[in-house]
Every structure is written in structure tokens, then in C-alpha cells.
Image (cartoon, rainbow, N blue to C red):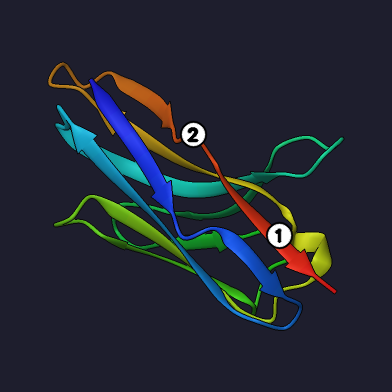
Amino acid sequence: QVQLVESGGGLVQAGGPLRLSCAASGRIFSINAMGWYRQAPGKQRELVAGITSGGRTNYADSVKGRFTISRDNAKNTVYLQMKSLKPEDTAVYYCNAEMQDPKYYANIYWGQGTQVTVSS
């Protein structure tokens, strides 16, 4: 069984920073890409940032220059450093990971989500 557990969400004033963490645990063979998604009320879940096992990153246009994704492969953890937060960043943030099992099948896992609220 594999689990992704997010932490670091909360309430922050506009312009402030916040750092999210997501740790994978359980029977992990290998982790390919990891990423962060978010879902605001009444909206679809959207990709915020992704990072490959080799460290290549991609970002949604709305967060480029403000958010930084990183990962610690030794700890099976992915981070999202957010700065210059805006009220429109308010959403539930979900961690996502693509993992390979010993038979090299790829499986997608999701965390339970962490609320980020940015006050104006």
C-alpha cells in the first residue's frame, strides 16, 4: 500500500509565502514524476507544477515565477514553495505521484489534499 501525505497548508495573507510538502510512504519501488494539483470551489482540478525523476519541471502559467517545485528522492518527498500568494491561489492542493511497481506497471497515486487559503 502506498500513501501520499501532504502538509503545510493553511491561511496566509496575500503576498505571503507558504511551503507545501508531500511524503510518499509504503511499498515504493520507484517514483517517476511527482506534481501538485489544485482545485478551487466550483472549478476543475488543474496542474500547478510537476517534476520528473530527473528534476525537469513544468508550471502552470498562472504560477510561473512565484512557485517552485522540488523533490528529495532520498526522502520520497516533493515540495511546493509558494511566494507572492494571491487570493486566486486559494484552493485545495493535491499531491500526485506516478510510481512503478516491480513489474514496471505505472500507477498514479493522490494525496488527501491540503487547504490553502489566501486572504486579501
Circle on res. 108: none
Image position, residue 75 (x, y; %): 18, 55
Residue furthest to the front: 11
Q: Is residue 55 left or right of residue 111?
A: left
In the image, is residue 58 above or below residue 81? above
Distance, label 1 to label 2, CA atoms, is 16 Å
The residue shown at (16%, 16%) is 103
Quadrant of residue 100 in the image?
A: top left
Mark 1 element type: strand
Q: Is residue 74 something that shows in the picture?
A: yes
Image position, residue 113 (x, y; %): 54, 40
Q: Is residue 20 left or right of residue 46?
A: left
Q: In this view, does 111 lie to the left or right of 53?
A: right
The residue shown at (27%, 18%) is 105
In the image, is residue 80 above or below residue 103? below
Image position, residue 60 (x, y; %): 68, 59
Q: Count residues near mark 1 (Cα–Cα under 10 Å), then give few for <14, some for 14-19, many for 20+.
A: many
Circle on res. 117: 1
Amino acid beneath label 2: Gln
- Return the residue at label 2: 112
* Count of marks placed on residues: 2
The residue shown at (47%, 62%) is 57
Instruction: State the residue in front, 88 or 109.
Output: 88
Q: Count residues near mark 2 (Cα–Cα under 10 Å), then give few for <14, some for 14-19, many for 20+.
A: some
Quadrant of residue 86 in the image?
A: bottom right
Image position, residue 9 (x, y; %): 54, 58
Mark 2 element type: loop
In the image, is residue 12 above or below residue 33? below
